[in-house]
Image: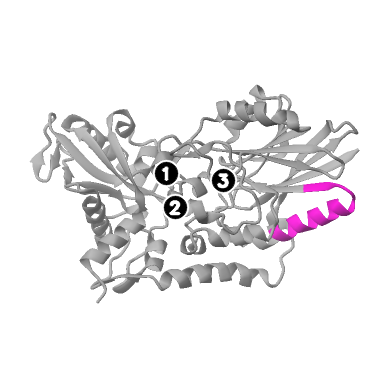
Amino acid sequence: MEQITILHTNDLHSHFENWPRIRRYLAAIRATAEQAGGTVYTFDLGDHVDRAHPVSEATVGQQNVKLMNQVGYDAVTIGNNEGLGFMRAQLDHLYDHANFPVVLGNLRTLQGALPHWAVDHRLLTTAAGTRVLVLGLTAPYQLTYPLAGWTPLAVMPTLSRLLAQYRQQADCCVLLSHLGINVDRQIAKRFPQVDVILGSHTHHRLPHGERVNHSLLAAAGKWGQYVGRVSLTLDSQHHIVAAAASVVETKTLPVEPADAAEIQGLSDLGESILSEQRVAQVPVAMEANATGHPQLVQEGLHAIAEYAGTQAAVLNAGLFLRDLPAGVVTQQHLHQMLPHSMHVMTVTLDGYNLWRLVQEFESVRLFLRHFPQRGMGFRGKVFGELNYLGIAYDAQTHAVTWRGEPVSPLKTYRVAMVDHYLFVPFFPTLKIVGQNQILYQDLLREVFAQYLGRHDPLP
């Protein structure tokens, strides 16, 4: 009987506090299994990079790739943090120095070509002659991938095509999935040709795997808190006769004396690089206050309105995580203050629907003030207080004014805000009737940096 061990990591999101132990564990399992005559393959399923960490921001993800090179991955796929966290020009160079292939079947350039840094499959062959087909798919965000310079392909037709093209060349098939558990289950029901689905994206953990139809689903949570392991047993005809999945909790793995310095060194490196990038010189300090209406948020409102060319703007105070000190402002200050993966968005509405949107804002204002918002690009603690520029609301009459004048139901209005509001469930008017334009070229902190540079330039 042949033994194949599959090790998998996913959704690290630059949580490097777990990385030294993960690296040692992967190396140790590989060495032990190979000494016993088995085959070991190691895969990453995407979202290794998160620009909320200073070194990922400062090196445009290159430090993440250096760390991944330490492992010797047999293949990786990308998550939305790689695919959407960078513009195409940046992603096109993320893997320039990688020692592993990126397997990705459902992303194309706007001209229809496979990215030059990716392959649509990989065929691995064990010492015993078993051929393992490796495919990779990522969540195809139809709205935002074109803004970043890519065309996403639908999952099911793409997988059907890839299996028709390559499956007969292999004895078994492993899918690197950054699609989420619900899509993984759908794939397992529809495509029995896929033997193992290594899952991610929804940060789910399957401690003992999950059998769906013919497929074994495996998943290891998030942030490097767990590492996944799949054990396959094959007969002399290269057929899988047994398959089992498990996870190991990273905090149970031994710590070495040098770990703390390595982890801190990554933060120090990123902060050092960002601290050297001077942006502006502001005359007075501005405080952050997630549950109030601080001057810092007012500056942010003016920044996004100016960037978008609108006369009104909306921002939640929970976006601003740190005070901005007086004096020279660096990219480090801005990254600490606005670590989010968000962009400015303009929304065009007629007066009635603007009135309705403001009613939605006001109806959840108290709830959102202390709401612990998670995901959708947000990297803060609470959503915080809603702040307006150019819009006012009368709580007694429910009237809405636009720059001091009553909103006219028949007029058209453009408002700047962050694209985050489109993806959270609190403001349905945006999805239902909003003419939404995401200005994808710059992140929110980059927009704020440009604003400060214009209004408080360096001497």
Element type at mark 2: helix
Report if the CB atoms under discs 1 and 2 are less than 8 Å apart.
Answer: yes
Mark 3 sits on what residue?
A: 78
- What residue lies at 91% left-to-right and 38% top-to-bottom? 1
Q: Quadrant of residue 349?
A: top left
3 or 1: tag closer to the N-terminus: 3
Question: Dot 3, crowdedness within 10 Å: few (<14), some or many (≥20)?
Answer: many
* Residue identifier under label 2: 89
Against 265, is 289 above or below? above
Residue span colored magenta: 23-40
Identity, as a three-letter code, of the amino acid under mark 3: Ile
Image position of 358 with respect to 61: above or below: above
Q: Main secondary structure of the magenta part?
A: helix
How many numbered callouts? 3
Residue type at mark 2: give it. Answer: Ala
Q: In the image, which disc is placed on residue 149?
A: 1
Magenta segment includes 275 = no
**In this orientation, which residue lies closer to the viewer: 384 or 441?**
441
Across and down, in percent, residue 348 comes to 23, 36
CB under 8 Å between discs 3 and 1: no
Looking at the image, tell me whether mark 1 or mark 2 is earlier in sequence order. Answer: 2
Above or below, 253 relative to 143: below
